[in-house]
Amino acid sequence: MSSVSIRNVTKAFGDHVVLSEFNQTFEDGEFVTLLGPSGCGKTTMLRMIAGFEKPTSGEILFGDKVVSSDRVFLPPEKRGIGMVFQSYAVWPHMTVFENVAYPLRIMKMPKDDVTRQVQEVLEIVHLSQYAQRIPSQLSGGQQQRVALARALVAKPELLLLDEPLSNLDAKLRESMRFEIKEIQTKLGITVVYVTHDQTEAMAMSDRVVLINRGKIQQVAPPAEIYDHPANQFVADFLGKVDFLSGEAGGGCIRLDGIEQTIPYDGERVGRVEVAVRPERITLSTKEGTLRGTLVNQYYLGDVNDCRVQVGEKQLRVITEPETYARMKLGDPVYLTFREQIVFDEEGSLEDKLKIVT
Ligand SMILES: Nc1ncnc2c1ncn2[C@@H]1O[C@H](COP(=O)(O)OP(=O)(O)O)[C@@H](O)[C@H]1O
Ligand SMILES: [Mg+2]
């Protein structure tokens, strides 16, 4: 069993509480991402799962085995985990083969078994033909795969990855995402992945645990967290969003600083915050709910990234690239929200309205 249960874990350094009352179970074979801004406590959580840090209070279990509590503390080498950090630290003087074999040598595994297991894992990370090279003869992506192979060679059931791709360039990062995901699926292991990159989290995870200031904000699969953010922080952190405040009532929301209304048939009355994804706004030069002026547009190839002035507010609208050539700055345009998320003033979610026309 390689599920991980975190029960009421709090971690403080001195009187600085870094994580508070963290409760979550990661299922056997699940790919879970801890996502959140820098300093929110992701690495600290991962280090506690690994056994490099002790929780101030609370328990951590692997399956039904307690690895960390008031009374029990299993050191990292007894936890049977694989781990890769941001700085992938492969040993420069050792060959790829020896780098990967290292954990098995420490375990005093018989030579033939070492050879077989290293070859197997090099195959999985597509490095078989580089076994005799030293790291400086490899690209960054290949070096990161060496680190990954070393973490996997002892066949852990749980793999912990802390921003393992952040030192790679954008294109490589993207392809490595799929490779890691593929390896995880092939081996059926549980992965806890730490990143501050929301695209990475969206692309790889079965579930995302979004953390802010040491507190879990939401735990959900990527699509759900994107479409149903639990609060304004989540809506803002994951994806692009326009926020508008206003007053709900009488079947509409009167938007502050815009002096126009949008339809609303939810139950909330009074002050609200409306969140809209820029790619879920229809932009038309002829008709729509809100009238505005095109103040900027950026041709990005796959989309036209626009800024539209509506009253005192500027909204970001992402639309089809073909619109770029058809519009010019200063043109009157109309916006219709195909979807809007309505929060109360404190920022918690009431409902999401789908306005599909
Ligand atoms: N060993 C430590 N001693 C004191 N403070 C620490 C220590 N490790 C981390 N912190 C603090 O805990 C907070 C969370 O850090 P970290 O878990 O590294 O965040 P993240 O990985 O999300 O960027 C930060 O404010 C950091 O300064
Ligand atoms: Mg970190």
Image (cartoon, rainbow, N blue to C red):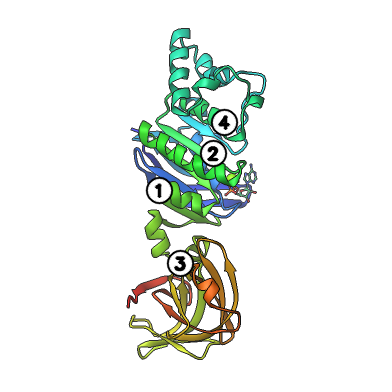
Residue 298 x/y as whole percent: 59, 68
Residue at image mark 3 = 231
Residue at image mark 1 = 24
Cα distance between the residues tagged 3 and 2: 28 Å
Q: In this view of the protein, which residue sits in the foreground, 116 or 17?
A: 116
- The amino acid type, in three-letter code, at marker 4 is Gln
Q: Is mark 1 within 8 Å of ligand 1?
A: no
Residue at image mark 4 = 142
- The amino acid type, in three-letter code, at marker 3 is Asn
Cα distance between the residues tagged 4 and 2: 25 Å
Q: In this view of the protein, which residue sits in the foreground, 299 or 175?
A: 299
Residue at image mark 2 = 47
Residue 215 visible in the picture: no
For the residues carrying marks 4 and 1, which lies nearer the camera in this image?
A: 4
Marks 3 and 2, the one that precedes in the sequence: 2
For the residues carrying marks 3 and 4, which lies nearer the camera in this image?
A: 4
For the residues carrying marks 3 and 2, which lies nearer the camera in this image?
A: 3
Hey, which residue is sitting farthest front in the picture?
325
Q: In this view of the protein, which residue sits in the foreground, 87 or 302?
A: 302
- The amino acid type, in three-letter code, at marker 2 is Arg
Q: Is mark 2 within 8 Å of ligand 1?
A: yes
Marks 4 and 1, the one that precedes in the sequence: 1
